Amino acid sequence: MLRIGYAFILTAGGLLAGYVAYALIRLLVISPAIGPVFKGVILLGALGLILTLVGLILERRKEKDDVDRDDGNG
């Protein structure tokens, strides 16, 4: 039951974060006060941040799996 609750919380958080990201990107794209080059730089920076976070999460999971196998728990 606890895992199901965690899954629901993580799903809700992911959906909320996705909607906030969508709203910010939409606001950035339709804003006439920001130049197109600066918009591109902001979007590239955000993409780099997201890819870095995903990479760190995947690396952390990989390390955890390696430790579990080394301990004989996996």
Image (tube, grey):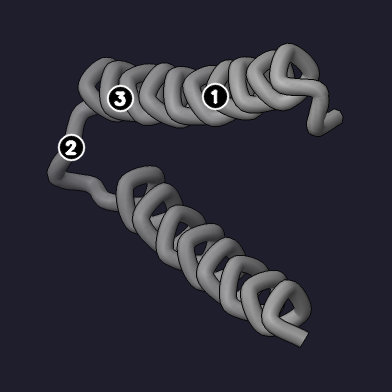
C-alpha gap between disc 3 and disc 1: 36 Å
Mark 2 vs mark 1, foreground winner is: 1
Q: Work out which residue is located at the far left of the displayed protein and give it.
A: 33
**Which residue is under mark 3?**
36
Residue 60 is tagged as 1
- Above or below, 7 against 17 in this view is below
Helix, strand or loop under label 2? loop
Q: Could you tell me how many numbered marks the image carries?
A: 3
C-alpha gap between disc 2 and disc 3: 7 Å
Give, as a three-letter code, the residue at label 3.
Pro
Q: Is residue 13 left or right of residue 69?
A: left
**Earlier residue among tags 2 and 1:** 2
Q: Residue at x 21, y 28 (%)?
A: 35
* Circles 2, 1 touching at the beta carbon (< 8 Å): no
C-alpha gap between disc 2 and disc 1: 37 Å
Q: Residue at x 63, y 74 (%)?
A: 6
Give, as a three-letter code, the residue at label 1.
Arg
Residue 34 is tagged as 2
Q: In terms of image quadrants, where is residue 10?
A: bottom right
* Circles 2, 3 touching at the beta carbon (< 8 Å): no
Give, as a three-letter code, the residue at label 2.
Ile
Q: Work out which residue is located at the far front of the displayed protein and give it.
A: 72
